Image (cartoon, helix red, strand yellow):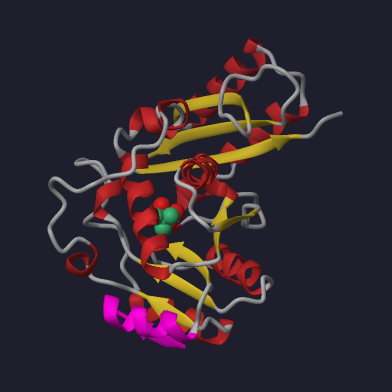
Amino acid sequence: MELLQDLEALADWRRINPGPVLVPTMGNLHAGHLALVRRGQETGRPVIVSIFVNPLQFGPAEDFSSYPRTLEQDLARLRPAGVAAVFAPSEQALYPLGRQGLTTVVPPAELSERLCGLARPGHFTGMATVVAKLFGLVQPGAAVFGEKDFQQLQIIRRMVLDLNLPVEIVAVPTLREPDGLALSSRNGYLDAGQRKLAPLLYQVLCGLAAAPASDAARERAWSRLESAGFQPEYLDLLDAATLQPAEGGGALRWFAAARLGRTRLIDNVPVNPR
Ligand code: PAF
């Protein structure tokens, strides 16, 4: 496995590994990331994992400076997984002219200015911009993203369509702990008591998805989270493709975000057609 930390090393690697599959990450890798790697390997292309904590997608009051940076541990996890290369650039390498005045990718408001976009203004512009840069640098034939960040996945799909980027987007279902909690690097912020409570978010979503949708059911679910100590941010039933309020016959998903102490948890589940 090669460790590539500058753009020249990446360009050299890419010349002998054209059209790889990219797994973009911010590091602090867990089993969910390894599932993305395995799915990438199924494409038969060499897998390159990028590790970069992207400052552009964090708000001023968010956890950019405290976000766990665990490169050595991440490399130790990726080596036995058969990954061909890791691209772990510095901020200087990725944003040589700085962050101010940068050309950015602004996703359409109908996808980005709802759900997480409401509490995290600018987040999806920062995310789409770095993913577009990674696509430009790595020139992957395919890229793998988890359904845990479902809004992110849909925004990337739309970016690829709108900008005619020749990258196949591969989605991987959310990996969960045995008690249902979606795997996330931010779960490490939970203390022991919060960790016990955290799976309630998934349980509430599953309860909503299993019953006919109604305002009363949503309000009950919201209160259940609040009584348990969560601060819910949103609990929405949306069309999975458009992220618009459910209308017509498209596949539906329940989406939730809630704070538990200082940790912001997000999750989503599909509503299976009866
Ligand atoms: O999902 C993530 O870890 C990040 O948003 C991504 C896609 C690596 C872009 O920084």
User: In the image, residue 194 lies at what x, y percent?
Assistant: 46, 46
Residue drawn where x is 59% and y is 48% of the image: 147
Residue 163 in view in this figure: yes
Residue farthest to the front?
A: 164
Of helix, strand and loop, which mostly describes the magenta segment?
A: helix
Confirm whether the magenta stretch covers residue 156. Answer: no
Where is ligand 1, by quadrant? bottom left
Q: Say if 58 sits above or below 26 in the image.
A: above
User: In the image, residue 77 lies at what x, y percent?
Assistant: 49, 79
Residue drawn where x is 33% and y is 65% of the image: 52
User: In the image, residue 13 lies at what x, y percent?
Assistant: 41, 84
User: In the rendered image, which quarter contains the C terminus?
Assistant: top right
In this picture, residue 3 sits left or right of residue 195: left
Frontmost residue, 134 versus 25: 134
In this picture, residue 60 sits left or right of residue 145: left
Residue drawn where x is 50% and y is 66% of the image: 23
Residue 186 in view in this figure: no
Number of numbered markers: 0
User: In the image, residue 252 lies at what x, y percent?
Assistant: 69, 29
Confirm whether the magenta stretch covers residue 13. Answer: yes
Frontmost residue, 167 versus 49: 167
The magenta span reads 1-16
Residue drawn where x is 53% and y is 58% of the image: 167
Frontmost residue, 209 versus 101: 101
Q: Say if 135 sits above or below 233 in the image.
A: below
